[in-house]
Image (tube, rainbow, N blue to C red):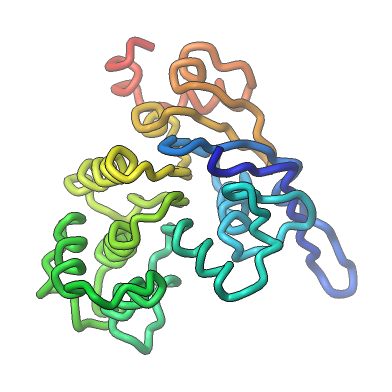
Amino acid sequence: MLLEVKNLTKIFTVGFLRRKEIVAVKDVSFNVKESEFVSLVGESGSGKTTTARMILRLLRPTSGSVVFRDRDVWSLRTLNDLRWYWRQVHGIFQDPFASFNPLYKVDRVFYQVFTLLGDNDVDKESLVNEALKEVGLRPEEVLGRYPHELSGGQRQRLMIARCYLLKPKLILADEPISMIDASTRAGILQLFSKLRDEYKTSIIFITHDLGLAYYVSDRVLIMHKGSIVEEGSPEEIMEHPQHPYTKRLREDVPLLYRKWSGF
C-alpha cells in the first residue's frame, strides 16, 4: 500500500464575533496502491481539494492521519524527511498561477526539481526541454518568461511538465486539464498513463466529471458534503450506483459517454 488516509477531518472556524465551525472534510478514509489511478469525484465544495491539500502537507488536518509508505506525513519534521516526501509526492492544481512566484521566470520551477533531487550531474537543459515537449509546449516559447506572460493553459502544462521531470511516486492532480484545450487533453492523460506504466506512479485524479473518471480510473471515490459516500470500480459506479448523489452524477454524464459505454 502506497498511501493510507485514515479518518481525515478538517474543520474551519470562521467569523469574528459570531464564530462558526464549517466541516469541510469529515472522517475520510481510503487507500491508494502502487501504480493505481484513483479518481476523487464530486462537485465544487465537496471537500476534494481540501483533502488533497492535507495529503500534500499544505493544510493541517483537524484529526486523522495521512500515511505514506508506512510513515505518518504529519510527523515528518527534519528537512531530510520533508525532502524525502516532496520528492515522491507532487501536486498539480486547478489554479496554476498560484504555483508560481510572479517575481521569477518560469524556468525556476524546473531547476528547483534538480535541487530537490540533489542531482547535478545531468544535462538539465535537455531534460527540461524533453519534459516541455511531452506536454505539447515549445521550450523557446515559454522559457525565459514570467508567469503573467503565459496563458492559464500554458502555466498548467508547465506544472505537469515539472511533474514529469520529477517522476514522483504519487501525483495529486486537481482538475489538471480544466484550463487546457481539448486537442491537448488526451495527450496529458496519456502522459499520466505513461508515468503509471513506466515508473509505477500512482495518481489521485480530482474531478467533477464522472464520465472522464470512468475512462481513466482503476477505482472511483465519490465525495459529497465532505464525506466519501461511495467507492468502487468505474463499471460498478456507472452500472450500479448506490448512493442518490452518485445516481445524480451519473445522470449528468453527457449522453455521448453513455452511448459509447452502453449505459
Q: Is 243 or 51 nearer to us in this picture?
A: 51
Q: Is 102 or 125 nearer to us in this picture?
A: 125
Residue lying at the far front in this picture: please name it: 121
The relative height of residue 183 versus residue 13 in the rendered view (above or below) is above
Quadrant for the N terminus, please: top right
Q: Position of residue 23 (x, y in %)?
A: 76, 51
Residue positioned 41% across, 37% down in the render: 35
Q: Position of residue 152 (x, y in %)?
A: 31, 65
Q: Position of residue 109 (x, y in %)?
A: 34, 75
Q: Position of residue 27 (x, y in %)?
A: 75, 41
Q: Is 49 or 113 nearer to us in this picture?
A: 113
Residue positioned 35% across, 18% down in the render: 258
The relative height of residue 117 versus residue 40 in the rendered view (above or below) is below
Residue lying at the far bottom in this picture: please name it: 103
Residue positioned 34% across, 41% down in the render: 196
Quadrant for the C terminus, please: top left
The relative height of residue 138 versus residue 47 in the rendered view (above or below) is below
Residue positioned 80% across, 64% down in the render: 13
